[in-house]
Image: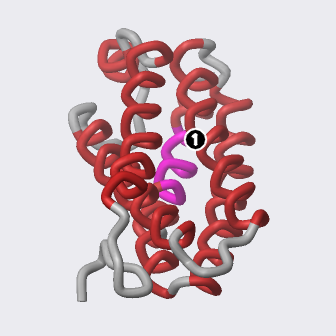
Amino acid sequence: MSVFAVNGKVDKGKLVKELLIPVVGGMVTGMIATRNAKEKYRKLKQPEFAPPSWVFPVVWTGLYATMGLANYRVSMKKKPTAAAEALYDIQLGLNFLWSFLFFKWNLRGTAFAEIGLLLGMITLTTYQYYQKDKVAGRLMLPYIAWVSYALRLNYSMWKLNN
């Protein structure tokens, strides 16, 4: 059975929409909020576990696609819930906001607090998704792992550059 099939069917239009919203939203946010981010990132004092700047767009593209796929799967269920939809929208908004806080506005302490909130919202979203669709819940796990890592990275960079 395909990861794209829910209740035995695939809604290609809905699938494309649910994939494009986070992927394109992330790209637009990246273009606006992280202009010159590679340069800014390289100039910051970094902890030893900081990845090279090229890693971020690769990882985020994959994560945006998997979260969009998870959202698609839940939305295709016979009884999608407003709570799951609201949590998804909130975490996606927080996700996009973080780039502005950290890169555009250089508010690394505020970005750290915000990413903690983001991680909580992703965890709640994942829990809701898992209740509705086990595959959707599992699709969110790499996102939790990456944002947990990003939380530590954000904290370290905030302290090193304060």
Residue receiving disc 1? 95
Q: Is residue 26 left or right of residue 85?
A: left
Quarter of the N terminus within the rendering: bottom left
Q: Predominant secondary structure in magenta?
A: helix
Picture layout, residue 84 above or below residue 58: below
The magenta segment: 147-156
Quarter of the C terminus within the rendering: top right
Which of the 4 quarters of the picture holds residue 48?
Answer: top left
Tell me what residue is drawn at x 41 percent, y 46 percent. 17
Q: Nearer the viewer, residue 152 or 18?
A: 18
Tell me what residue is drawn at x 35 percent, y 10 percent. 36
Q: Label 1: state its secondary structure.
A: helix
Q: Is residue 111 visible?
A: yes
Query: Residue pushed farthest right?
Result: 83
Residue 30 at x, y percent in the picture: 41, 24
Residue 148 at x, y percent in the picture: 53, 59
Picture layout, residue 87 above or below residue 136: above
